[in-house]
Amino acid sequence: MTQDNTVRLLLVNDNPRELFALNTILSDLEATTLTARSGREALALLLQQDFALIILDVKMPGMDGFETAGLIRQRSRSKHTPIIFITAHRATDLDCARGYELGAVDYLFTPVVPEVLKSKAKAFIELYKNHRYIRQMDVELTQLNYQLQQQVEHITRLNEVLRAEITAREQAEAIALQSETAHLIVQNTGDYVALLDAEGRWLYASPSYHARFGTDNTLPGSDFFDLVHPDDRERVREAFYRLVASGEAARMQYRVLLPTSAERFLESEASLVHDPSGKVAQVVLVSRDITERKEMEAYVLHLSYHDPLTALPNRALLEDRMKQVTAYEDRQHSHAALLFIDLDHFKDINDSLGHAAGDRLLQEVAERLSTCVREEDTVARLGGDEFVALLVGIRHVHNAAVVANKVIATVSAPCRIEGRELRVSPSIGIAIFPNDGKNMEALMRNADTAMYYAKQAGRGQFSFFTPKMNETASRRWRISSALQRALEQDEFALHYQPRVCATSGEIRGFEALIRWPQPNGEWIPPSQFIPIAEETGVIKAIGEWVIREACRQVKRWSVEALPIQPVAVNVSARQFRRDGVVQTMKGILRETGIPPTMLQAELTESTIMADPVAAAKILQEIRRLGVHIAIDDFGTGYSSLACLKRFPVDTLKIDAAFVRDIATDPDDAAIVSAIIALAHHLKLTVVAEGVETADQMAFLVEHGCEQIQGYYFSKPLPPDQARALLASGRIDVPD
């Protein structure tokens, strides 16, 4: 077996952007980098291979870095593997002590300095190579000792077998099997024993040979190789003649054919018997049936290269085929395509229906994917809801798009799982060999990046990789890494945009809008960092910070005896769907002591309509706290009048997209008029967002819109300017 000299590094992080950045930093080292997005994935990889270094994220959902490290240390194979913990949090002395007790060799904090990480990784790579060399020397010495012992045992066993066979034959010829006991001993000899001449012709076959293969096939003078499977015959014949020529004992494994045409595997040990002149007189062949062992080896090999749930090739087999494909396509100057396929909202199915239903859905998706490609292509499952399709020998990039469209249509079709009709759509990223990468690591990374673009574009579609995506992905990773730091170091700020009475100009409230100023004086707009916060889960902490800071600001204004007004905060879809949003509001209201009516929760129409039944329950709980509720961006979703009546809503906010052209576009004017009439019918307050011109203002006043929000009156203001506005109590309505 060829010695695997690959040096591997394992990166464990639940954040795909951080994985990408760390992978990029270490990409030019003399090591192969593997990644895992959870502790469980890391432990699975450690069962299959060794690593020179593990770079392990501390803060991961489910099994965190400390728990993962503890399990790594419990396994003898990885007991001494160096671990570097990496975290966005400043570790306390207790954290450090716990990490070092678990065998950590260092702590690093994000954002990581690339040069520091590379230098540490290089040192452990060299240390690993030295240790591996020493282990290899020990293994080789052990193997040599074992081989010597096996040779001694082999010779001893051959002598015993030959003595038994010669004795039995002499007794049989001398007394014609007069002894029934001797006859039974001969008939039940476990091994197959054959004596052949130097040309491979039968001289003698043990009774076990006769019983298994029949007397006709083992007659003296007939060709032994006729029993061997045709596909193995020449190989065994050549090995036999080499044995006769060299005089050295040999061991062979090969298939044989039974009289029933069934196949069995035999393992044979061969040695030579010489006549007084030194010529080979006989070849002694002692064989045993190893069919069950071969079948088990084949089964284990299949498990090593296939996903146990879907029976698709796994990452290891995909990597092997990728190497073959890239080598061939490179010589032929043709193209291959790698499609990175991720199922949209699969986690929701797992959470709502359970893992058994999720596994059955994955099996169904695997079957459908296999029907979308040719026989020479490969569909593999990487883990979770991630699949890869490797398309070989494509002539045009358009061919990859055709397959991607076929995958989307096939996978998106409804299927029945446990009596339910389920639908799941795939988002696909496509990377082309050799344009987008010349090895699996580069192609996978770039296809993964393109897949995220497909998700951002609306899901259920595909996207080809472009170099510009890497730049954007790097920026997104930097923002993602900085978000946690911004929370810890209180870098965010709230600005307040007033809601104004349309007729009198009186201040009726504010909307709290988050801002992220940078040390260089620039601002990162919410449109850039909020989607990243949603993806990484940081939005929950940011949303909690916004609610707390807005309530604290109301409290400060109250202490100054200002005429306080309600402040609205935006509740994100992910924050709303997670358990605890009601308890968060309740705790902050108790902490700050402000009246609940001074807080208003704003949710987009699409957030509420994603699951109207669950939304109605949560909204009722928020309303029972005394907090007012507004539906933001109204008109852009799909809420029905029946649903709207069930929700305990106080305010409808008309989306700015409809307000923008109400003075010139009859359709927008009709929509806004209808929303205002609907709000009045339901006895709700209506607020128009994005009001910037006198014409828009005149239309809204004419049609009875009570409150206005937009640059026509005021942009979002920092707290001190908002305080001054609150103290005045009103804004003069422009003529």
Image: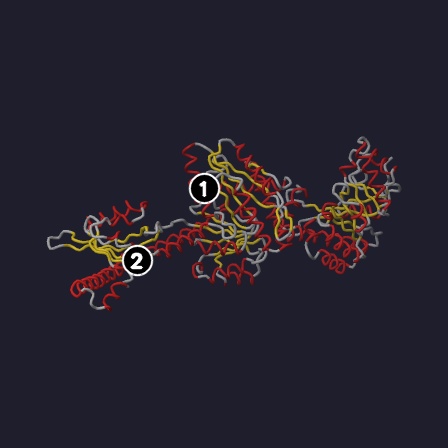
Can see residue 212?
yes
Question: Circle 1 sits on which residue?
Answer: 322
Q: Estimate the x, y position of residue 25 in percent, counting from the top left.
A: 50, 45
> How far apart are the two marked residues, 1 and 2, measured between alpha carbons?
38 Å
Q: Nearer the viewer, residue 288 or 299?
A: 288
Residue 347 is situated, as x and y percent measured from the top left of the image, at 61, 51
| In the depicted structure, whether residue 224 falls above or below residue 458 | below
Amino acid type indicated by mark 1? Met
Left or right: residue 332 compared with residue 200: right
Q: Position of residue 186 (x, y in %)?
A: 24, 64
Instruction: Look at the picture and state if 141 lies above or below 453.
Output: below
**Residue 409 falls in which quadrant of the image?**
top right
Disc 2 element: strand
Which residue shows up at 43% across the image and 41% down it? 323
Q: Quadrant of the C terminus?
A: top right
Q: Left of 291 or right of it: where is 435?
A: right
State the residue in front, 26 or 291. 291
Q: Is residue 318 above or below residue 188?
A: above
Which residue was labeled with disc 2?
288
Q: Amino acid at mark 2?
A: Arg
Judged by depth in the image, the label closer to the viewer, 1 or 2, is: 2
**Along the line of sight, the residue nearer the viewer: 197 or 159:** 197
